[in-house]
Image (cartoon, helix red, strand yellow):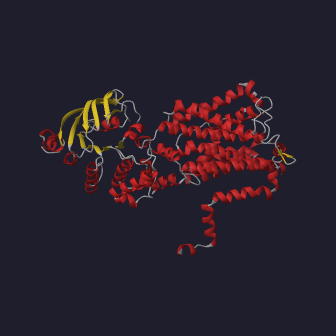
Amino acid sequence: MSHLSALTPRDRALAFLRERWDLVALVVLAVAPLCIPALGGALGGQVTTLFIYCILALGLNVMVGYTGLVHLGIAAFFGIGAYCYAILTVPMYPFQMRFALAAAISGLAAAAVGLALGAPTLRLRGDYLAIVTLGFGEVVKVTLRNLEQITGGMKGLNPVPPPGAGVRLGDMDLGLAFAVDPRWFYYLALLVLAGVVVAMRRLENSRLGRAWVAVREDELAAAAMGISATKVKLSAFAMSSAVAGLAGCLYAASLSTTADPNAYDFNRSIMVLCAVILGGLGSIPGTLLGVALLVGFDTVLAPWADAWIQQMNINPTGSSLLSFSGWRLAVFGLALILVMRFRPAGLVPSRRLAAELHEVHG
Amino acid sequence: MPLLEVTDLVAGYGPIRALDGVSLEVEPGELVAIIGANGAGKTTLLMAISGVVPPRAGGIRFAGRSLAGLPPHEIMRAGIGHAPEGRRIFPRLTVRENLELGGFARDDRGQVARDIDEACGLFPVLGQRMAQLGGTLSGGEQQMLAIARALVGRPQLLLLDEPSLGLAPLVVAKVFEVIKALSARGIGVLLVEQNARAALKLAARGWVLETGRVTLTGSGAELAADRRVRDAYLGEA
């Protein structure tokens, strides 16, 4: 009690933020569209994309953060989710399912592909697993491009109908509402993200979550505890892939197209991986912050700065040296170098990694 | 019927035969010591019993049941606890989490919690360190944690690999005292030790391993009195 009373209101506010950052963020994000009109426009779409990347990164974090398996092809599962959802909903196919059902099936399909990739590669660790997942990512991209009859090739599949198409809410068509006002998607993505965060927290403290960490720490010791490394790693593969697939559904639905297969290439995998590492491996708030910074920079800040430069007529010749996005990757790289130099466990390190690095330095 | 029965066990790594026809047995609640020089195959023997190194030939029967072909996690579930060489605790998990993982294979959470308390009764220092990360414990505390963690799995047989390695003499005495208490409680113990003197003093029976073969066997006292053992392992000329 005595030390509490010694705290200034500012300290107390900070402590509250540290404890309940999740609630504060959720309330702020839920109220924001009501206060910021720009979220009803292009910005709303960009922030929705940000939420979707947060979901994707939380999925990747299961493998890379909790279980310690290097994965360089998460975008492939993002793509599988997106295409699967599109196939189940676009008018050119006979299925035309509702959003929730199609999303569930797409998540499961991505998980099944994850299992199929995981089963033969379970014995691989580190660099070797990295190469396999990297190769798999390329295979998926090229397959999506070449299976033109099914995937539409470079055109992708479209139009992907908005969620709730044909559902009437009073005298309003829900699908139309989604199509007209990006705030509907904003709230849908936020809701799914919140659900994924809650699920990840529960997983962290579940038997399975403990087993992931035990296998990451020491496979032999884990086996001596009666933990089957095979099953545990497969479950991590499946969970990562399912969450990534779910993110893919939202992505395709929010863009109303799968976009072309290049949207699911290596760059995307690396960007998400960088976000997880930058934020803090195995840390939920870290992962979210990493995405907000890296992807936010890429999808919100960079286009905005480009537009501003154009508006101010600073760059009439269109030289890439004078456009903001021309410097995008340099800024990326610099940020990563600085973080790895000064906060090697990430911006918001998970408790365990922080402890280990502290031990090494101290 | 012996609790553990190993017959003509052959195991190795690639072209190397680390075990070349080893036979031994452990009765329920018996404390058995394996002594031998570096490279004699002691650690491989424990790894083969716990399934980490799959045997190439020979048999391992535990409580009347063959362990052939079982993966390590199922052998553990059958009742064999392993505190491996180098302790192998989870350094980035807390002491409590380490102990809870020891009970991972069990369903009765309440009983696991009581067993954790009991293990801390054996090693009171662990009870004071519950919230600390495993990696921050001293070597002796880590060894105690490794043994306690294996005990939470409720083994009928405990495989202990070099529990005294790198520990101060006082700590070794404490660890050995607990090992003796375990066997008094009916847990069979297969103890691999460099510290042959202390191990033979404790053990009911011992086996001497040399380059993958058993060269001598007898009661702990017999072996400790044996000329060859004294020359080779007890440092008496």
Which residue occupies 58% across, 54% down? Answer: A348
Which residue occupies 73% across, 43% down? Answer: A326
Lateral position of residue A22 relative to residue B166, left or right:
right
- Residue A252 in the image: state x and y as whole percent: 74, 38
The image quarter containing residue A260 is: top right
Q: As rendered, which of A76 and A215 lies closer to the eye?
A: A215
**Residue A296 appears anywhere in the view:** no
The answer to whether B135 is drawn above or below residue A16 in the figure is above
The answer to whether A6 is drawn above or below residue A266 in the figure is below
Query: Extreme right residue here?
Result: A171
Locate the C terminus of chain B and report the quarter of the image it occupies: top left
The answer to whether B146 is drawn above or below residue A24 in the figure is above
Which residue occupies 37% across, 31% down? Answer: B54
- Residue A142 in the image: state x and y as whole percent: 67, 28
**Residue A261 appears anywhere in the view:** yes
Q: As rendered, which of A208 and A82 lies closer to the eye?
A: A208
Which residue occupies 35% across, 43% down? Answer: B82
- Residue B20 in the image: state x and y as whole percent: 27, 29
Lateral position of residue A283 relative to residue B52, left or right:
right
